[in-house]
Amino acid sequence: MIPEAEKHRFEERGHLFLRWTRNFLFLTGFLAVSYVALTMLHAKLYQSAANNALDTQPDATNPPYPTAQLNASQPRTAPSEGDLMGRIEIPRLGMKVAILEGTTSQTLQLGVGHIGGTAFPGEPGNFGIAGHRDTYFRALKDIRAGDEIRVQTSTGLSTYQVDRLQIVDPSDVGVLAQSAQTAITLVTCYPFYYIGAAPRRFIVHAHIVRDST
């Protein structure tokens, strides 16, 4: 039989282990929630500042955020990852979000991203934009043919109309193929409510109907 004193020591060690485990899990959970909250706050503040920059200085040559130079009469300045390019709006869905250059994880936390190798807003060709299905592009689950898409940049406004929707495999890069027509393609993961890495991609194709850039 185990002596009473030794049995008591085992119980104390067990209680101590449980307390440390509980405190560790609480601290881990607190830090995780704090990180998510800070990330969301940072993104919200960025969106507010980006919208303000586009609304108050639409024709500025040096806006508060680095902006890709889209004026054809001037030499193009190659945008860097994370540079503010403009804003995309889908009025019927109540969606409005900043467009940044690139598609890294950090960039897509702040907004939606211009897909490298595709055209720039208002240019002939296919302008590709990627965004997360669980944040900025969640509204695309309700988009339909005929919806209006607006892209505001520092040089003007381009308006597109949705032609068709597609669901494709991630390997199908043909959806971003260049074309002679001025068009826009939105890309996000699918299904929208899938848990984990979604296996497919949801694609929105639209053509330009008005351009004031």
Image (tube, helix red, strand yellow):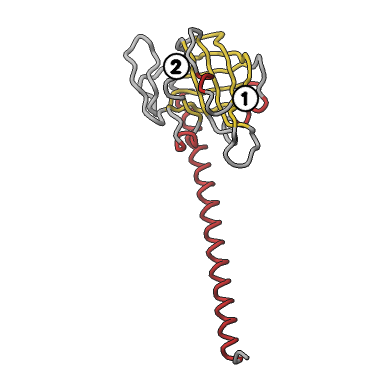
Residue type highlighted by circle 1: Ile
Q: In the image shown, does 85 or 206 lie closer to the viewer?
A: 206
On screen, residue 50 versus residue 92, left or right, reads: left
The residue under the point 55% across, 17% down is: 150
Query: In the rendering, at what x and y percent does residue 79 appear?
Result: 37, 24
Q: Quadrant of the N terminus?
A: bottom right
Residue type highlighted by circle 2: Ala
Q: How many neighbours does mark 2 have within 10 angstroms: few (below 14), some (14-19), or many (20 or more)?
A: many
The residue under the point 60% across, 13% down is: 161
Between marks 1 and 2 in the image, the one whose residue lies nearer the viewer: 1
Q: Give the labeled residue for mark 1.
A: 167
Q: Is residue 204 above or below residue 32?
A: above
> Which secondary structure, mark 1?
strand
On screen, residue 202 versus residue 211, left or right, reads: right
Query: In the rendering, at what x and y percent does residue 54 appear?
Result: 47, 23
Q: How many neighbours does mark 1 have within 10 angstroms: few (below 14), some (14-19), or many (20 or more)?
A: some
Query: In the rendering, at what x and y percent does residue 189 appear?
Result: 58, 31
> Which secondary structure, mark 2?
loop
Residue 119's label in the rendered image is 2
CA gap, disc 1 and disc 2: 22 Å
